[in-house]
Amino acid sequence: MKQFDKKNYVEDVRRKIPGYDLMAEIIFRAVIPNYKDTHIVKNILCIGGQNYEVQGITEAFPTAKLFLIEPSQVMIDVVREECLGLKEENIRYVCDKFENFNVEQSFDLCLCLLVIQFVEDIPFFLKKIHNSLGENAMLILSVFSKEQLEYWKYFALHMGADFIQVQKTYERQEEVMKSLSRNEVENHLKNAGFHNVEMVCQILPSIMWVAEK
């Protein structure tokens, strides 16, 4: 998998994931405010989160404790550098895979954006998130759309791209991350025990879901 340049990581993410800023805007200006109005949030779980998520969470919930779990120390260092003005005592950085994380308390909210397609055992991963949440807690999940990947493939062929090259590129994409359809994501969430599973929006290649425990 391509490694992002630490010095330009934030710009690299925004450039390579179309609609990333808009997805964050919808989360922190629409989804979370509605949830905040009806729920007390003390502990927040952020899996593979970046500085936009950390800044948005701490702004929305200034007294809540945030647990950021990320397997790359480089990525954690990037987030720390970008979030120097935030209250460090309210943020716990954990360098580990979520699958290995020893959950010591229940969480009121979980953000997991563009992560599960890189997870080996998705049912186990989502079930562990479910078990980590308190009653009526919410999961905000986003994934890359399988339909968008298929669209890219046929669009490239329609525009005259070489079939063999397109097929090789598409196969490499499948090696890097799993390709999940809307129905697959919904079924995974429901099988993990979530209810009120709702597809909130699709922003270019990314689909965002909200699910409750």
Image (cartoon, helix red, strand yellow):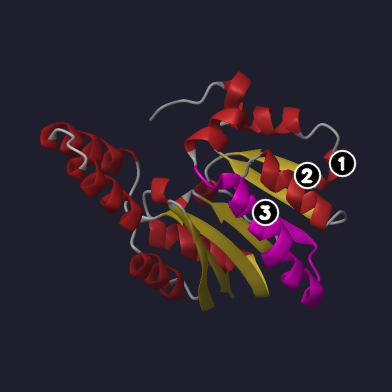
Crowd class of label 3 (few under 14; some 14 to 19; many from 20; radius 10 Å): some
Q: Nearer the viewer, residue 158 or 56?
A: 158
Q: Does the magenta stretch include residue 42?
A: yes
Residue 105 position in % (x across, y down): 70, 61
Q: How far apart are marks 3 and 1 (CA)?
A: 22 Å
Residue 174 position in % (x across, y down): 27, 43
Q: Do tag 2 and tag 1 residues touch (Cβ < 8 Å)?
A: yes
Residue 107 in sight in this render: no
Residue 155 position in % (x across, y down): 25, 46
Quadrant of the image containing the C terminus: bottom right
Q: Between disc 3 and disc 2, whose residue precedes?
A: 3
Circle 1: residue type? Lys
Q: Name the residue under label 2.
A: 91
Q: Nearer the viewer, residue 45 or 115?
A: 115
Q: How far apart are marks 3 and 2 (CA)?
A: 22 Å
Judge left or right: residue 202 versus residue 149: right
Judge left or right: residue 95 versus residue 89: left
Q: What element carries label 3?
A: helix
Q: Between disc 3 and disc 1, whose residue precedes?
A: 3
Residue 166 position in % (x across, y down): 19, 36
